[in-house]
């Protein structure tokens, strides 16, 4: 069994919930503007966030990892709850949670190995086993790491290859891209282009985008 982050991901439509990319900003200055879709007031980031938010908000849905864990009967560790308590998740907190997950897996007899990082997102491999074996690891992942992992991965997508190719497609349409990945998705749709089928799929499927700049 391998848990890792692989690009490209499927992109959500603005207004539909996808926890991985719909971010609650922490710290950036914001600018009010009129959206192209009917003149309703919209708010766009004018600076990149400096940490991941602890609640993910879409237009129609909100994802609170603590509430989700409670609904699933999962007891988050005190360390995860403490990291979430101040409203943001930092790289150090994310790394520390990963180490706690590994310590838990080691103690449970689960073979676990870090494989490196991509875009500051940890890649790791877990030895496959039977249902009882997998349950041991899943318990470690859920209690020690899952909430911070979800939030951090969503935050880092602002610097990932998808954000870069979306920016390239927007520039090709004659505009400067907005900062956040969800803003880029919305912007490209307002320009009449499907972000997934007309931008992400053809560009990322052709290989590395060495010149892409988010």
Image (cartoon, helix red, strand yellow):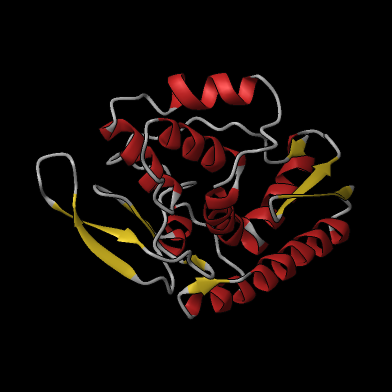
* Residue 12, image quadrant: top left
Q: Position of residue 6 (x, y in %)?
A: 67, 35
Q: Is residue 85 left or right of residue 104?
A: left
Q: Across the whole image, how many numbered discs are drawn on residues?
A: 0
Q: Position of residue 136 (x, y in %)?
A: 75, 49
Q: Position of residue 114 (x, y in %)?
A: 85, 51
> Going 41% across and 36% down the picture, which residue do you hit?
170
Q: Is residue 172 left or right of residue 99?
A: left
> Going 27% across and 65% down the picture, which residue do you hit?
31
Q: Nearer the viewer, residue 152 or 146?
A: 152
Q: Is residue 60 left or right of residue 51?
A: left
**Placement of 203 over or under 91, stated as above or below:** above
Q: Quadrant of the N terminus?
A: top right
Q: Position of residue 10 (x, y in %)?
A: 50, 30
Q: Nearer the viewer, residue 157 or 84?
A: 157
* Residue 135, image quadrant: top right
> Going 44% across and 37% down the picture, which residue do you hit?
171
**Placement of 44 over or under 212, stated as above or below:** below
> Going 41% across and 29% down the picture, which residue do you hit?
195
Q: Nearer the viewer, residue 21 or 2?
A: 21
Q: Is residue 159 left or right of residue 129?
A: left
């Amino acid at each position: 069994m391998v848990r890792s982050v692989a690009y490209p991901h499927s992109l959500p439509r603005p207004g539909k919930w996808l926890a991985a990319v719909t971010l609650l900003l922490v710290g950036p200055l914001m600018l009010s503007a009129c959206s192209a879709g009917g003149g309703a007031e919209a708010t766009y980031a004018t600076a990149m966030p400096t940490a991941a938010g602890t609640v993910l908000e879409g237009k129609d849905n909100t994802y609170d990892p603590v509430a989700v864990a409670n609904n699933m009967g999962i007891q988050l560790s005190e360390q995860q709850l403490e990291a979430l308590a101040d409203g943001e998740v930092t790289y150090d907190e994310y790394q520390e949670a990963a180490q706690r997950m590994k310590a838990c897996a080691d103690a449970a007899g689960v073979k676990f190995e870090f494989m490196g990082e991509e875009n500051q997102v940890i890649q790791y491999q877990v030895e496959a086993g039977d249902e009882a074996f997998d349950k041991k690891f899943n318990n470690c992942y859920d209690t020690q790491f899952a909430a911070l992992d979800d939030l951090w991965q969503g935050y880092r997508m602002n610097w990932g290859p998808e954000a870069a190719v979306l920016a390239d497609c927007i520039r090709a349409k004659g505009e400067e891209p907005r900062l956040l990945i969800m803003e880029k998705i919305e912007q490209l749709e307002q320009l009449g282009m499907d972000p997934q089928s007309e931008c992400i799929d053809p560009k990322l499927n052709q290989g590395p985008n060495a010149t892409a700049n988010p």
